[in-house]
Amino acid sequence: MPRPIIIDTDPGQDDAVAILMALASPELEVVGITTVAGNVPQPLVTENALRLVELAGRPDVPVYAGARRPLLRPLVTAEEVHGPTGLDGADLPPPRTAPADGHAVDFIVEACRRAEGEGITLCPIGPLTNLALALVKEPDIVEGIREIVVMGGASFEGGNTTPPAEFNIYVDPHAAHVVFTSGVPITLMPLDVTHRALVVPDQLERIRGLGTRVGDAVAGMLDYYERHDVEKYGIEGAPLHDPCVIAYLLEPAIFTGKACHVAVETSSELTMGTTVVDWWGVGGGTPNAVVMRDVDADEFFELVIDRLARLG
Ligand code: BDR
Ligand code: CA
């Protein structure tokens, strides 16, 4: 039985690769995609998600539009990374399909309530606003959630948006607080691990060399997206942050980390949105997340390209 997942996303070129990988993977059943304002505002993130399910040849996967802004703070976006459309470099046509009826938060609630067996896995790869709203609206949904695998936060690596904070958590720290105190099992992919999951030039050429529509679109997107990080960090290629979440579901053994207590800073403006990871267990808090710290980068890329190659 494929593992049922919901991808909560703000596409975003790295979100795009995560979505495409998931849609190409028979081990996973993407029951829906929910969108959240983040890298770019609504309705752009929703249009981008619709473009991506069409690119993957999966317009049957419903896309639900979600939160338009964070819970308390004004929306901060990242056009400097992702371009004004959020998916610059892909050159995808406008979507032919429409978003599904209903709000993303209600879809998440219903999907958790309907979940059978071990429950549903939630895969947030943008700000955590929709998940927090669902958990606040109907707290009993925790019963139906198997695990939340989050791309967000930073510990040893430092932040990418402020000195200590990573973008997804910084944009909606109050939502992140709700999720990290929900009691649901959490696996966290912070910058510590995603900054090791780079697409270097030879690998980018292998993606381009797939010679498919998906390969061309992904190569175009990553070409655009890497320019920012290569300059910012002096690294060889773009970090594939969000695909780490999907790669973890497919091949957990390529990641290493440990169970820690994680708290989110929500009061100090200086450190707003910092994930305070108690890596050494000195704070006395009960671990609430498995925090990843490293990935086998070669295995990770082989998995990415294998899945992208399965799409036309
Ligand atoms: C995260 O922020 C976004 O810009 C990316 O899509 C990723 O989810 C990395 O900090
Ligand atoms: Ca994202």
Image (cartoon, rainbow, N blue to C red):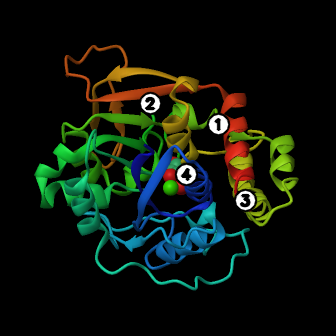
Q: Residue at x 30, y 51 (%)?
A: 173
With respect to residue 170, does 153 lie above or below?
Answer: above
Which mark sits nearer the N-terminus, 3 or 4?
4
Badge 4 marks a residue whose secondary structure is helix
Which numbered circle lies on residue 155? 2
Q: Which of marks 1 and 4 is in front?
A: 4
- Tell me the mark number nearer the camera, choosing from 1 and 3: 3
Counting from the top left corner in percent of width and height, residue 12 is at 57, 62
**What numbered label is drawn on residue 121?**
none
Q: Name the residue under label 4.
A: 22
- Along the line of sight, which residue is nearer the eye, 227 or 96? 96
In which quadrant will I find the C terminus? bottom right
All told, the count of numbered labels is: 4
> 138 or 259: nearer the eye?
138
Circle 1 residue: 197
Q: Residue 15 placed where, x, y %?
A: 55, 56
> Looking at the image, is mark 1 or mark 3 earlier in the sequence?
1
Q: Can residue 148 be seen in this view?
A: yes
Asked whether the residues under the numbered discs 1 and 4 touch, taking CB atoms below 8 Å apart as contact, a structural biologist would say no
- Give the position of the N terminus as an image quadrant: top left
- Give the spatial CA distance, label 3 vs label 4: 14 Å
Q: Are marks 3 and 4 in contact (CB under 8 Å)?
A: no
Task: Give SS at disc 2.
Answer: loop
Q: Name the residue under label 3.
A: 218
Of discs 1 and 2, which sits in the foreground? 1
Label 3 beta carbon less than 8 Å to ligand 1: no
Give the side of residue 249 with respect to residue 301, left or right.
Answer: left
- Give the percent coordinates (x, y) of residue 228: 69, 55
Residue positioned 50% across, 42% down in the render = 245
